[in-house]
Image (tube, grey):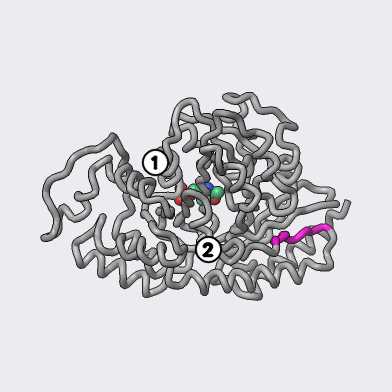
Amino acid sequence: MPDKFLPLAKPDLSEEEIDEVVATLRSGWLVYGPRTQRLEEDFRAMTGTKHAVAVSSCTAGMHLALLAAGIGPGDEVITSTLTFASTVNVILHAGATPVLADICADDLNIDPAEIARRITSKTKAIMPVHYAGQACRMDEILPLARDRGIRIIEDAAHCAGSSYKEQPVGGIGDASVFSFYAIKNMTTGEGGMVTTDDDSLANRVRILRNNGLDNNAWNRYSAAGSPFYSVLEPGFNYRLTDLQAAIGIGQLHRLPQFNARRAELAARYTESFAELPEIETPTIRDDVTTNWYIYVIRLSRLSISRDEVVAELKQRGIGSAVHFLPVHMHPYYRETFGYKAGDYPIAEREFERILSLPLFPQMTDADVDRVVSAVEEIVAQHRA
Ligand SMILES: *Cc1c(COP(=O)(O)O)cnc(C)c1O
């Protein structure tokens, strides 16, 4: 009998989260209430930042962080081409111009030298994307922004629970934005969090997420609140609901366990692939602690393409994925900005051979062994 399909990722939801959702329903307070406040407070404590502002997604949070930082038409924002498209979409939504940069071959993060090369008098923000859970080389990126009026807005979608030089990701640049999408390390289904030490940036994100209403509206429906509000600027409805926050509270509580289990599974993969020269395992720099959001191998010396390896794994009941098709290769970006093959040689070369293998806390050691055996078999059949 064929084995059950092993997906790339799967959320780990417990009775703790289910009970909290039910309690939220029974409370009748579904949005903008005590559970959102609790999740913000707990997340703030984890990152050690002054503020944590819950939003409806990482995408929404990045959009607001850019607007709150004053980024708009005429401004350039530098980010990695090896990211999920929403990082770049929000730069356009803010009215600014995205400037893509190539990556480092070792950790697949944005290359600080590439950022430096692309800074102009119009550069108003840099958006480092912490790929796969491993923070970028922030010590080289931060000085590029200092004294130039350039803001650092981090795409920390992959990074809940990661740290850089012993400091939790979240309080390094001007703002960091996390994702609680279904397959991220902690989830609320959809959701996100903006963290920052900057009071005015945090305040503006709070206003913009709630249609531009002043903050007194927070308690509008409680005995302590005021029924009056005024609109300070045209904002958005980017709120997280209390039902989602109820899931997030338990997820955040269990995040250290999730990440510890991910690290064990990743170590098992890395050990198992040690003798297989066709498989390069992830390079983790020694100045970071990764949360192992994804486990990305690189293929070499095979007679078949990476896409064919994906298909071979699928035939064996194993899910895999590619993070990511570089942004400059997507039709919209290619056609709008005139990118062509060869513009970002490292990202293009690595894209051809990256492959994300199943990794989630509920995976067993036997699941890892099953993936390893399948990869070994595919490699043995297709050595170049
Ligand atoms: C998942 C992801 C996002 C988007 O997060 P949402 O919460 O779904 O908006 C942004 N950037 C990167 C790098 C991601 O992987």
Tell which residue pokes out farthest to the front in this image: 147
Mark 1 falls on what kind of element?
helix
Q: Residue 250 at what x, y percent from top left?
A: 39, 70
For image coordinates 49% across by 57% down, the residue present is 170
Magenta region, main secondary structure? loop
- List x then y, in percent, for residue 143: 61, 46
Query: Percent from the top left, x then y, of residue 319?
Result: 62, 58
* Side of 372 relative to 367 (left or right): right
Q: Of the residues shown, which amino acid type is indicated by label 1?
A: Ala
Question: Label 1, on which residue?
Answer: 68
Element type at marker 2?
strand
Image: 235 above or below 49: above
Q: Position of residue 206 (x, y in %)?
A: 32, 48
Calculate the distance from the C-alpha at mark 1 to the C-alpha at mark 2.
23 Å
Picture quadrant of residue 292: bottom right
Left or right of residue 85: residue 114: right
Q: Which mark is residue 168?
A: 2
Task: Estimate how packed mark 1 is, as few (under 14), some (14 to 19) or many (20 or more) residues with alpha carbons within 10 Å.
Answer: some
The amino acid type found where label 2 is placed reads Pro
**Residue at the image position 25 percent from the left and 65 percent from the top:** 24
Q: Is residue 84 visible?
A: no
What residue sits 73% from the left and 64% below the top?
374
Q: In terms of depth relative to the viewer, which is nearer, 129 or 48?
A: 48
Visible residue check, residue 220 = yes
Q: Which residues are magenta?
A: 278-285
Q: Earlier in the sequence, mark 1 or mark 2?
A: 1
Say which quarter of the image contains residue 338: top right
Inspect the magenta stretch and tell me whether residue 108 lies in it. Answer: no
